[in-house]
Image (cartoon, helix red, strand yellow):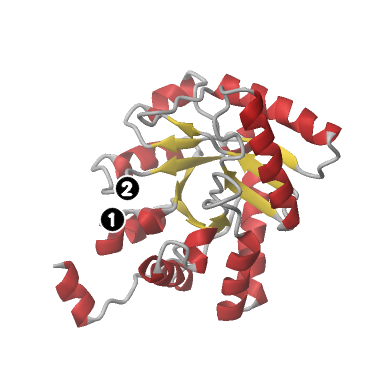
Amino acid sequence: MIDIHSHILPQIDDGARFLEESMQMAKQAVSQGITHIVATPHHRTSKFFNHKTTVLHEVEQLNLALNNANIPLTVLPGQEIRLFGEMEEKLAEEELLTVNDTGTFILVELPSTHVPAYSKQLFYNLMLQDIYPIVVHPERNQEILTRPDILYDLVNMGVYTQLTAGSVTGQFGRKIKKFCMQLLENNQAHFIASDAHNIRERACHMQAAYSVVKQAWGEQLTHTLQQHALHAIQGTFIHKDQPQKIKQNFFQLLWRA
């Protein structure tokens, strides 16, 4: 199993204590059947700035430590990049990391409360360069929850989305789990990843999430999602089924008005 989004480098500039936490997270990932995991430290938030060169170095060091400890996990480089207007320029300046540094897919985090007005144009510009945004945990964005057509429009133009495993299992509440199921049902979700931050309250729940998907839709969708993860780390083309708009009943529309 491949996990394309984990904060297995929880705070890469804080030394030995966090190396130990990374090792514990690695053991937990292996217990979930994960063989490859993309390290996605936060980048360009109010608290975190993790440059591409720093991440590449720390991932190399973590893989050495895992090998020395005989932990059968391969860590690949990445970032969870908070959306900002100069992403194109910073990609050109080698500040930003695509998934596994292949130059194809890039993990983008939206603000939690809204979708910036410039998002669509920025994503379009990236795709013109054959760099495809993967919007992470859109199910937890407040504006998307109340106006799901915003996400539909992004997916319809070629953007990919990734659900957090804990959202699929209900860790973030019934409303978010239901929205995840609607996104999967309507071909608006393309990956499931752990978004693990530690081994406690934000742990890895990949097996449980895939079990939910399998129970609802069977083996085929589970296999498809796992194949998408493989393609993401390889930087190869991912076929997407045509997205459908989420059907809303009258009471949902009234509540969101």
Height in image: 164 above or below 215?
above
Height in image: 208 above or below 73?
below
Height in image: 155 above or below 77?
below
Task: Write down the quadrant of residue 198 in the picture.
Answer: top right
In this view, the residue in front, 4 or 235, is: 4
Which amino acid lies under the numbered mark 1 shown in the image of this protein?
Gln
- Residue ID for mark 1: 142
Height in image: 206 above or below 58?
below
In this view, the residue in front, 106 or 157, is: 106
Question: Do the residues under discs 1 and 2 have CB atoms within 8 angstroms?
Answer: yes
- Residue 190 appearing in the image: no
Which amino acid lies under the numbered mark 2 shown in the image of this protein?
Ser
- Residue ID for mark 2: 112
Q: Is residue 121 left or right of residue 184?
A: left
Q: How many marks?
A: 2
Residue at point 61%, 48% (across, down): 199
Mark 1 residue crowding within 10 angstroms, few (<14) / some (14–19) / many (20+): some
Image location (x, y in percent) of residue 44: 40, 29
Q: CA distance from mark 1 to mark 2?
A: 6 Å
Q: Earlier in the sequence, mark 1 or mark 2?
A: 2
Which secondary structure lies at badge 1?
helix
Q: Name the image quarter holding the N terminus.
A: bottom right
Disc ID at residue 98: none
Q: Is residue 115 left or right of residue 204?
A: left
Q: Is residue 46 left or right of residue 221?
A: left
Residue at point 50%, 56% (across, down): 164
Which secondary structure lies at badge 2?
loop
